[in-house]
Image: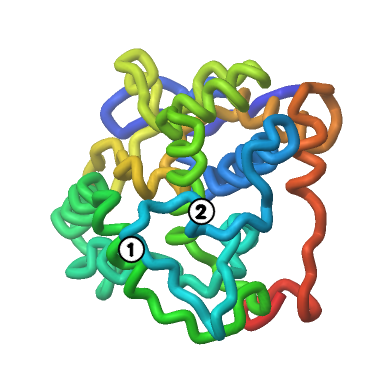
Amino acid sequence: MQFYGYGNVSGSVNTTVNQNTIFGIGSITKVFTTILLSDIVVNDGLIKLDDPLQKYLPSDVMVPKYDAQNMTLENLATHTAGLPEFPDNFCKDHMDNFDVNRTTEYRMKIIECTQKYSPSELYQSFSNTLITTEVGSKFGYSSFGTGLLGNILAIKSNMSYDDLLEKRIYSVLGMVNTSITLTDEQKSNLAVGHINGDELPTWNLAPVIAPSGGTYSTANDMFKFVSANIGLIKTKLDIAMQESHLIRHYNGFLGPNNV
């Protein structure tokens, strides 16, 4: 395998991008979260895909329902729970008017507020969410749901989400530069984001929402991850990965209004 890089890691550092340069991989994190779910289901038997969410949430958190239907772990993993893309209280003052072309100062405020979002805020928004469609009947892309799923898995395993990924995925595949929390050495090799020519600080999502998009990785590590997913290498994650690849259609083709 050959890797080709272009440009430098930042405007201020004359270091060429290569296969070990660290990038934020955003919502690819969701794939890690769903494989993590599949691995725990397949190899531990601690949970089931059709388990109702209430089983894993604090007693004071109300699971929203539609016609008394139970929302399940599988619904969160497949974006069929009927949840919106983001919690309604997630950086609301800034996200309501989100624009990628806004000023550096505006983007800095977005970064700051996403780092402070708390579990209590997530649970509050979840309890107050109005579900308007039959659970499992329609696809609706939801960082909200994946963030909640990652937190449930971490709590059930008595580990942080990042440590759980390290134990069950990264170490298994030899992904040595993939993490949500970067070391100082890794930060020095991070491709820096820019807006309007200005460098932006590292975007560290709050732990409660990080399972939906908080991971950093390299081309080299992601090659290992993809190779395992398509069967080029054999690991103890094989069955869990195959399970996560199963097509789950409900009403036709995957799309904005149906599954």
Query: Element type at marker 2?
Result: helix
Report which residue position mark 1 lands on: 100
Query: Element type at marker 1?
Result: loop
Residue 109 as seen in the image, left or right of residue 82: left
Camera-side residue of 148 and 110? 148
Picture residue at 73% right of the left edge, 31% below the top: 43
Residue 25, relative to residue 149: is it above or below?
above
Camera-side residue of 160 and 191? 160
Residue 37 as seen in the image, left or right of residue 22: right
Residue type of the residue flagged with mark 1: Val
- Quadrant, the N terminus: top right
Q: Quadrant of residue 198?
A: top left
Picture residue at 55% right of the left edge, 48% below the top: 30
Report which residue position mark 2 lands on: 55
Is the residue under label 2 in contact with that under label 1 (CB below 8 Å)?
no
Tag 2: Cα neighbours inside 10 Å, few (<14), some, or many (≥20)? few
Residue 103, relative to residue 160: is it above or below?
below
- Quadrant, the C terminus: bottom right
Camera-side residue of 12 and 1? 1
Picture residue at 53% right of the left edge, 33% below the top: 6
Which tag is nearer the camera, tag 1 or tag 2?
A: 2
Residue 17 in view: no
